[in-house]
Amino acid sequence: MKKREMICIACPIGCHLEVIEDKTSEGGYIVKGATCKRGEVYGVKEMSNPTRLLTSTVKISGGSLKRLPVRTSSDIPKNRIFDCMKLINAVEVEAPIEMGDVIIEDILGTGVDIIASRSLH
Ligand code: SF4
């Protein structure tokens, strides 16, 4: 029986969760310690398919700053973060860039884009 303790990061309260495998329940796990539904969803997802939003920066030339803040357009699998960072670190873009511009499309075939978090001219 899989069982793990974790802190919920879905809000700043940070409830202490205990997630226990239970094949009879919906989602395959029971979550104890969650004081709201978001914590239950987080606990199950963290055990079955943990994902994260990724934020970083890329090199930019011709702009008012040397680095452009970027982020994933949605969550990516946690185990792909390291490989995504390698690609992000290798990218250099040229100003002007508008907030939301796609910097890397469909990174590592995840269906998620790396997009600009701000405009930079
Ligand atoms: S369980 Fe709910 S209240 Fe507790 S940290 Fe998670 S989101 Fe916040």
Image (tube, rainbow, N blue to C red):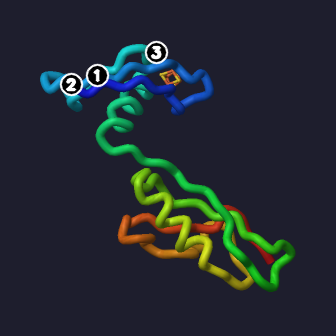
Q: Callout 3, which amino acid?
A: Thr
Q: Measured from the top left, where is residue 60 in percent x and y?
A: 74, 78
Please name the amino acid that badge 2 sits on.
Met
View extreme (left): residue: 24
- Furthest toward the right, the residue is 64
How packed mark 1 is, by other alpha carbons closer than 10 Å (few <14, some 14-19, many 20 or more), is some
For marks 1 and 3, the one nearer the N-term is: 1
Q: Which residue is tagged 3?
A: 35
Q: Mark 2 to mark 3: distance in Å? A: 24 Å
For discs 2 and 3, the disc positioned in front in the rendered view: 2
Cα distance, mark 1 to mark 2?
Answer: 7 Å
Q: Report the side of 10 relative to 68 (left or right).
A: left
Seen in the picture, residue 61 relative to 22 is either above or below; the reply is below
Q: Position of residue 69 (x, y in %)?
A: 70, 64
Taking the spot 71% from the left edge, 76% from the top edge, the residue there is 59
Q: Which mark sits nearer the N-terminus, 1 or 2?
A: 2
As helix, strand or loop, the secondary structure at mark 2 comes to loop
User: Which residue in the protein does label 2 denote?
Assistant: 1
Crowd class of label 2 (few under 14; some 14 to 19; many from 20; radius 10 Å): few
Mark 1 touching mark 3, by CB under 8 A? no
User: Which quadrant is home to the C terminus?
Assistant: bottom right
15 sits to left or right of 40: right
Q: Position of residue 109 (x, y in %)?
A: 36, 71
Q: Are marks 1 and 2 in contact (CB under 8 Å)?
A: yes
The nearer-to-camera label among 1 and 3 is 1
Callout 3: CB less than 8 Å from ligand 1: yes
Q: Position of residue 44 (x, y in %)?
A: 33, 32
**Tag 1: amino acid:** Ile
Q: Is residue 107 above or below residue 40?
A: below
- In which quadrant of the rendered image does the N terminus lie? top left
Q: Give the labeled residue for mark 1.
A: 20
Q: Is residue 83 above or below residue 62?
A: above
